[in-house]
Image: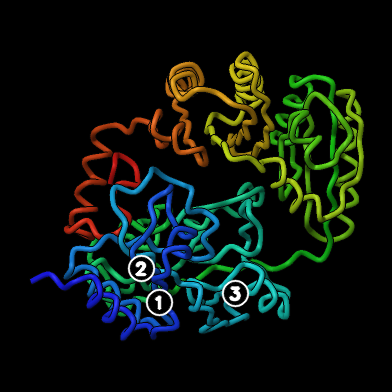
Amino acid sequence: MAVSAPALGDAFAAIVGGEHLTTAPSQLAAAAVEGVPPRWLARPGSLDEVGRVMSLASVEGLAVAPRGSGSALDLGAPPARLDVILDLSRLTGVLEYVPADMVATVQAGVTLDLLARELCKHGQMLALDPYGGGSRSVGGVLATNASGQRRFRYGTGRDLLLGARFVQADGTVTWGGSKVVKSVTGYDIPKLLTGSLGTLGVIVEATLRLHPVQPASGSWLFSFTSREAAGSLAAAVLASSLEPERLAWLNAGALERVGSERAEAALAVSVATVAEAVTSQGALLGSMASRLGARVSALDEGFWTRVGGGLASSTVVKLASEIRRLPFWAGEVERVISRHGLTVSLVGEAGNGILRAAVEGSVSPDTWAREIVAPLREALAAEGGSLVVERAPLDLKRAADVWGPVPETALAVMRRLKTEFDPRGVLNPGRFVGGL
């Protein structure tokens, strides 16, 4: 028999403590996901409490949206339903850190800044630099597989997550990965959970591969009067023996936002290694860029934090293409968007073929779906690429599927996984690919 709402509130409060359960309408409205407010916001303080909240939600058929810092809740489709926000921000423990093995196990609510402060004591780092900065939580970064410019050298969270403890939709606590106590046979749990938007399980602890902080680094901005010249430098760098750490593409709009000198396009490059190699690689980069007519300026390390400011917009789309085609797609995005009176800032990961476009201006949902998203998505798909709407006003999200089409064979596998891990559809229903 279903429990009444007041009784459920009392039950959640009994688990997490009354001071950690939010029921005030104004606070719940502020915690809404895509305009859908929860009925409760629970902040468990332990693994046991997470499991008990999930168990109760499962028994009562409630929909749960996990969150860490809450900075990426606008990723994904609007929820089909929402009852409970499971806020993991109280889980901030660094549980185990073995510098000799360059491995750390942390709770999901640990922020990147907090973890960086611990790791730097031993000259190490978690090589993830997602847009949004160090206030983001480890669990949220993994659940969204968020990454930034360091992806070029170190990969994404999917590459750095060695093991995970997670709470299944029915409250069962499970391990997967390198520190296995109990695992779901046959699945690579860390890879399944990373990027699943919390639809398969709630990550509560993560065992992470670390990297040493390099003794020296240098960063430079190479500005050009044409996209083609910037693309030529990117291609030359990738074909050379240089070992850059980050390789960012910026268009005129993004350059203006980050306070750099105006140019048609620019390539920002960082090198991190021993001091002698930084000097020699910087000299070689400068020589290559000068031959292509670049203006060269040195960058401070803070540039790599500021570069995310180029994407400060309520509407951001992410394109994935072949690396060599990124300059073409940068021009194509500018052309398609500007003909509707909109402006666009582009920040690309030139070594990965990823291009993010921050769009400014007003457009009707129909125009957005039919004349911007659809033609870009169709043309990208013809080359094996994709387009995801990472952030947009609700009316634009409703007009165009934020994830885009997925091959039916792949979607069938994802449906089977969802059914196995979350048969009652408790976790983030409707927000992931294919309406999962």
Residue type of the residue flagged with mark 2:
Trp
In the image, is 66 to the left or to the right of 124?
left
Q: What mark, if any, has residue 40 been given in the picture?
A: 2
234 to 88, vertically: above or below = above
Name the residue tied to disc 1: 21
Q: Residues within 10 Å of mark 2 (few under 14, many from 20)?
A: many
325 to 429, vertically: above or below = above
Q: CA distance from mark 3 to mark 1?
A: 37 Å
Q: Residue 17: x, y in percent?
A: 39, 86
Q: Give yes or no for contact between labels 1 and 2 (Cβ–Cβ under 8 Å).
A: yes
Label whose residue precedes the other's in the sequence (3 or 1): 1
Q: What mark, if any, has residue 284 been given in the picture?
A: none
Residue 164 shows in the view: no
Q: Secondary structure at mark 2?
A: strand
Q: In the current view of this chain or complex, which residue is farthest to the left?
A: 1
Q: Residue 424: x, y in percent?
A: 17, 58
Q: CA distance from mark 1 to mark 2?
A: 7 Å
Q: Can you tell which of label 3 and label 1 is closer to the viewer?
A: 1
Q: CA distance from mark 3 to mark 2?
A: 39 Å
Quarter of the image holding residue 317? top right
| Quadrant of the rendering where the N terminus is positioned | bottom left
Residue type of the residue flagged with mark 3:
Met
Q: Give yes or no for contact between labels 3 and 2 (Cβ–Cβ under 8 Å).
A: no
Q: What mark, if any, has residue 102 been given in the picture?
A: 3
Q: Residue at x 62, y 67 (%)?
A: 112
Q: Nearer the viewer, residue 309 or 57?
A: 57
Q: Secondary structure at mark 3?
A: loop
Residue type of the residue flagged with mark 1:
Leu
Q: Nearer the viewer, residue 136 or 124?
A: 136
Q: In the current view of this chain or complex, which residue is farthest to the front?
A: 25
54 to 45, vertically: above or below = above
